[in-house]
C-alpha cells in the first residue's frame, strides 16, 4: 500500500493517514522528513521502502512461494495489482500537479490584480503631485521676477528721492537769486513776487514732501535721515538773506 507503506493490501482499501515512504511518519508532502526513520511493517528504524526490512523479505519470499506453487493465478493477481496501483498513483500525482498549477495561477492572478489596482490608485496621485510641482515652479519663477522688479523700483525711488532732495535744496535759492537780480529787494513788486514764489514753492513741495514721508516709512533709516536732515536752507550771500523751511514749505526773508 503506497499510503500506509504496509504490505498485504492495496492503497484503494486504506482509509487511514498517509505515511511518508522515506521516513515512515505522517506529515505534509512539502514538509521535511523526520530525521529518525520508522518502518510500520517491522517497527524498525529504517525507511519503509528499505530492501533490508525483514517483513519485506518475508513478504517477497511468500509471494515467490505462491508463484512457485501456482504461477499463473499468482502472476495474474500481481500484474493486475501493479497496473491498478500505477494508475492510482499516476492519477493522484496528476491531480496534485493540476491543483498546484491552478493555485499558482490563482495567486498570480490575485497579485496582478492587486498591482493593477495599486497602479490605478497611484495614477491620479502622481498627476496631482506633478501639477503641484509645476505650480510651485511657476510661483518660484513669479517670485523671482517680482523680486527683480522690486529691486528696480527701489533703485528708481532712490533716484527720484535724490532728485527731489536736490530740487528742494536748490530751487528756492535759484528763484531768490533771480528775483533779487531782477527786482530790488526794497520794492513793493519784490514783496509781491516773493509772496508768489512762496505760494508756488508751497504748492510744488507740499505734495512731494507728503509722498516722500510716506515712502520713507517703508525704506531704510538712511533714507529717512537724509530726507529729514534737509529742513532749512539759509543763504549766506549778503544780497540773498532768506531762509527756506522745506518741512513746512515756507520761504522767509531775514531782516538785517
Image (cartoon, grey):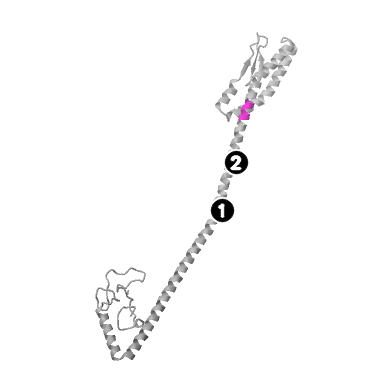
The residue sitting at 55% across, 47% down in the picture is 133
Which comes sooner in the sequence, label 2 or label 1?
1
Q: Do the residues labelled 2 and 1 touch (CB within 8 Å)?
A: no
In this view, the residue in front, 18 or 162, is 18
Q: Residue 93 at x, y = what percent?
A: 40, 76
Is residue 160 covered in magenta?
yes
Q: Mark 2 points at which residue?
A: 142
Is residue 214 in view?
A: no
The residue sitting at 71% across, 18% down in the picture is 197
- Is 10 situated left or right of 227 in this image? left
Dot 1 crowding, Cα within 10 Å, few <14, some 14–19, many 20+ = few
Q: Name the residue under label 1.
A: 127
Q: Which mark is residue 167?
A: none
The image shows residue 21, relative to residue 141, as above or below, that is: below
Residue 57 lies in quadrant: bottom left
Is residue 118 in view?
A: yes
The residue sitting at 46% across, 66% down in the picture is 107
Is residue 42 covered in magenta?
no
Residue 195 lies in quadrant: top right
Numbered disc 2: secondary structure: helix
Q: Residue 91 at x, y = what percent?
A: 41, 78
Q: Magenta span: helix, strand or loop, mainly?
A: helix
The image shows residue 36, relative to residue 144, as above or below, that is: below
Q: How far apart are marks 2 and 1 (CA)?
A: 23 Å
Dot 2 crowding, Cα within 10 Å, few <14, some 14–19, many 20+ = few
| Range covered by the magenta-colored residues | 155-161
Q: Residue 71 at x, y = what percent?
A: 31, 90
The residue sitting at 50% across, 59% down in the picture is 118
- Is 10 situated left or right of 58 in this image? right
The image shows residue 236, relative to residue 55, as above or below, that is: above
Amino acid at each position: 500500500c503506497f499510503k500506509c507503506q504496509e504490505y498485504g493490501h492495496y492503497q484503494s482499501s486504506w482509509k487511514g493517514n498517509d505515511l511518508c515512504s522515506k521516513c515512515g511518519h505522517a506529515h505534509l508532502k512539502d514538509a521535511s522528513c523526520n530525521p529518525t526513520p520508522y518502518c510500520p511493517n517491522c517497527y524498525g528504524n529504517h525507511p519503509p521502502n528499505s530492501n533490508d526490512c525483514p517483513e519485506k523479505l518475508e513478504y517477497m519470499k511468500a509471494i515467490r512461494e505462491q508463484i512457485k506453487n501456482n504461477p499463473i493465478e499468482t502472476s495474474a493477481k500481481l500484474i493486475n495489482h501493479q497496473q491498478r496501483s500505477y494508475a492510482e498513483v499516476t492519477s493522484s500525482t496528476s491531480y496534485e500537479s493540476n491543483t498546484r498549477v491552478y493555485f499558482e495561477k490563482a495567486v498570480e492572478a490575485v497579485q496582478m490584480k492587486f498591482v493593477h489596482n495599486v497602479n490605478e490608485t497611484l495614477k491620479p496621485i502622481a498627476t496631482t503631485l506633478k501639477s503641484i510641482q509645476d505650480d510651485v515652479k511657476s510661483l518660484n519663477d513669479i517670485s523671482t521676477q517680482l523680486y527683480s522688479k522690486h529691486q528696480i523700483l527701489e533703485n528708481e525711488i532712490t533716484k527720484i528721492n535724490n532728485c527731489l532732495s536736490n530740487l528742494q535744496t536748490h530751487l528756492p535759492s535759484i528763484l531768490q537769486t533771480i528775483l533779487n537780480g531782477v527786482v530790488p529787494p526794497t520794492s513793493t513788486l519784490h514783496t509781491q513776487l516773493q509772496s508768489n514764489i512762496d505760494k508756488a514753492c508751497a504748492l510744488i513741495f507740499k505734495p512731494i514732501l507728503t509722498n516722500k514721508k510716506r515712502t520713507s516709512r517703508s525704506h531704510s533709516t538712511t533714507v529717512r535721515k537724509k530726507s529729514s536732515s534737509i529742513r532749512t536752507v539759509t543763504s549766506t550771500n549778503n544780497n540773498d538773506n532768506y531762509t527756506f523751511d522745506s518741512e513746512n514749505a515756507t520761504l522767509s526773508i531775514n531782516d538785517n
